[in-house]
Amino acid sequence: VQAFEALGRLELDTGRAEAALGHFDAARDLILASPSPDSPQLPSIWNSAGVAYTQLGDWEAARRAYGEGIASGERILGSDSTPVAECLLNLGYMDLLEGNFEDAAARFTRAYAIHEKNHGTESSQAAYAASRLGLLEHYQGNYEGAQRYFEQAMATQARLLPSDHPDLVETHCNLACVNAVLGHPDKALQHLDLAVSNGLNYPQIREDGDLSSLHGNPEFERLADLASGGR
C-alpha cells in the first residue's frame, strides 16, 4: 500500500495524473480487500485520488473522492483529523471556483480550525488554510480582508518554508494582486518580484485584471516577461 501511494504521489508531482490514479486505486483496493479495511491511510489515498481527478478535469469524480476521504477520515481517525482538513480544503477550493462561496467558507473555516487545533496557529498547515480563506475574500471582492489573510499566511510561510515553496510563491502572487487593487503599487511589485524570482510561472499574467493598474510600469513589464516566459 505504501509503495503504491508513494508511486502515485511521485506521478502527481510530475504531472502524470492518470498514472497516479492507477497507483492510488491499487493502494485503495488493497486496503479494502484486507482484513483491516479501516486503515488510517485510506483517507489520504482518497484525497490524493481527488487531486488526480481534478488534474484530469473530472470534477464529479474528484468531488466523490474528497467526500469519501472526509467520510472515511471521520470514521477512522475522527472528525478533527488532518486528512479530513486536507479533503475539506480541496473540496472547498472546487466550491470557490464554482462560485459556491457559502460552502467554500464553511469548509475552509472548519479546515482552519482543525489545522489550528492539531498543528498550531503558526503552522504551515494553518497558514495554507488561511490563504484559502484569503482567496475566498478575494473572490468576493473584499480585498482588505483578503490582504489580512494572505499576510497572516505569508508571515508563517516565510518563516517555515523555503523561499521557492509553491505555497509561499502563490501567497506572494496573491498579495501582489490585492495590493495592486488597493492602490499600493510599490508593495504589489515587491511581492510580485518575490514570486517571480522564486519560480512563478504565469503565462496569463498580463490578462489578470487585478494587476491592470501596474501595466506600463517598467518593473511590472520586466517581471511579467519573466513570469510569462517572454510572451
Image (cartoon, rainbow, N blue to C red):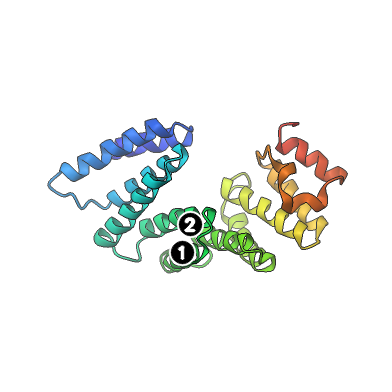
Q: Amino acid at mark 1?
A: Asp
**Quadrant location, the N terminus:** top left
Q: Is residue 44 above or below residue 202?
A: below
- The residue positioned 43% from the left and 45% from the top of the image is 59
The foreground one among 182 and 73 is 182
The residue most toward the left is 35
Quick check: can you spot residue 7?
A: yes
Q: Which mark is residue 93?
A: none
- The residue carrying mark 2 is 95
Q: Nearer the viewer, residue 148 or 183?
A: 183
> Vertically, is 67 above or below 23?
below
Residue 41 visible at all: no
| Image quadrant assignment for residue 150 | bottom right
Q: Residue at x 69, y 46 (%)?
A: 195
Compared across the picture, whether 133 is left or right of 10 comes to right
Element assignment for label 2: helix
Earlier in the chain: of badge 2 and badge 1, it is 2
The kind of residue tagged 2 is Asp
Of residues 126 and 70, the one drawn nearer to the viewer in this rendering: 70
Which image quarter: residue 216?
top right
According to the picture, the residue beneath numbered tag 1 turns out to be 103
Q: Is residue 4 left or right of residue 110?
A: left
3D distance between C-alphas at marks 2 and 1 = 6 Å
Residue at the image point whose x is 73% and y is 53% from the top: 210
Residue at 50% x, 62% y is 126
Mark 1 falls on what kind of element? helix
Residue 148 screen position, x and y as percent: 65, 67
Q: Residues within 10 Å of mark 1 (few under 14, many from 20)?
A: some
Q: Are marks 2 and 1 in contact (CB under 8 Å)?
A: yes
Percent across and percent down for residue 170 are 62, 49
- Name the spot of residue 12 as percent of width and height, x first: 44, 36
Residue 218 location, x and y as percent? 87, 43
